[in-house]
Image: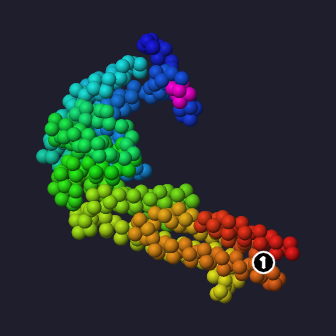
Amino acid sequence: MTALAPQKLAQLRALMRAVPEELRQRLIGAVSAGDETMGRLLEACAKDARTLARERFFRPLEPLSADPAIARPSLSHAPPAMLESAWNWIEEVLAPDIAAAMVAVTADPLAEDDPAHDDPLRARAAARIEEAVTAVKEDPRAGKQLRHRLGIADFRAVLEIAVILRVAPVLREALDGLPGEIGDISEELAQHIRDRYDLAYSKDPDAGVWFLYLLMARLKRPWVILRVFEKIVRRDDDFLLSRTDVASIGDAMLEDAGFFLNGFADPPPTLDAAHEAARALAQFAQITIGMTREIGIRKDGGWGRQIMALRQRAAQQMEAIHAEALLRMDKAVPDPHKPVAARLKLHGEALEKAASRAEILCVFIRLTRDDSSRAAAGGAHGQVMDRLMQRLEFSAGGILSALRNGSAEDHVDERAAVIARLMTALGQQEAASIFLRRTAAVRAA
């Protein structure tokens, strides 16, 4: 496809920006399926020149630019907000010439996109970033102003951005040919990755660790990168900590584990949150168990002690959630063997609210049944599941008996529905179905 005339390009950009976001994405997807080049054109025209320039300039950082609110720390070294602030700084103060050159490069959306074309601009910007940070270190007031402008507590993150921009050509060469998504690392692939790491490290020592971070971003199970470590440092235990790059990646995985640990720090408030918390627990278990199994981390080693501490916190958090689940069950389905004051026998809106709160934790308990043991909470988890189900079964039996002997109280149908609902939430759909059928049969008798 030849370049479009500036007037036609302006018209297409105006059209794409006028289309609602959802429709725009559907249009781009449909067009891309038939014509990749045209799809790329439409996608480019949906953004202004400044956005295109920023995205292209920071492309080497893209795999590490996730939102830290929803992504693990190892994927969010350069979050979108930080890149926006850094670009504003480059554009307005640090290197307006570089920003203008990038805007000029992206003026034609159909121009050939050579990944290496912008490396000289990135290297110049990286040098200016490092020079600017060095300069403000001698001026506390200027340093405070720059940190405020960039929205950062210290300059570590922005210096990391500068390093990745500077070593982008080395990283691109080292990663070339490796799968974009890696499910497992075979012995052969581990050897190949070790060679690529050595290549990156030999060309620029600063590139070594970022090669590992970018590689980890491609792994479905990030902890399997530990299989490569033995080949890098020729050891297979916690003495890996003696190598700075390897230690950095191990620490990053522990930070990831801490991120997922925070994902189930409190009882989830909604059903969606229950699913998210269960996924966080699964990820936490996979990382901590994966790290231990891959290289046989010693419990008294550096990483081993941190993993044990994280797992202890996980057990404490789950213990608190278990206690809350039992409390919510007490309110929604009181113990039939204990006298309950009439004012505490909920019905209507109050019962629905109590049932919803109990259902959320029942769902979480069910979803985390398999992963709880790997997160150091297996035995207690099983006991809580048994206690919750026993309460429901006892209450169901009490309702059936009351219906049979004619002593059923008011709102019994509501309570029966709640019991069936919570049985289902715990994964006992068949028990819930049988209970409801028996209830209907007793009423029809």
Residue drawn at x 21%, y 31% as measured from the top left: 123
Amino acid found under the numbered disc labelled 1: Asp
In this rendering, does residue 204 appear at all? no
Residue drawn at x 40%, y 61% as measured from the top left: 285
Residue 88, how many percent across, how many down?
Answer: 32, 35
Residue at which label 1 appears: 410
Residue drawn at x 39%, y 28% as measured from the top left: 52
In the image: residue 332, left or right of residue 244: right
In the image: residue 333, left or right of residue 176: right
- Which residue sits furthest right? 445
- Which residue sits furthest left? 138
Say whether residue 31 is magenta.
yes
Residue drawn at x 25%, y 43% as measured from the top left: 191
Q: Is residue 233 above or below residue 239?
A: above
* Tag 1 secondary structure: loop
Residue 34, how many percent across, how many down?
Answer: 54, 23
Q: Which residues are magenta?
A: 28-33
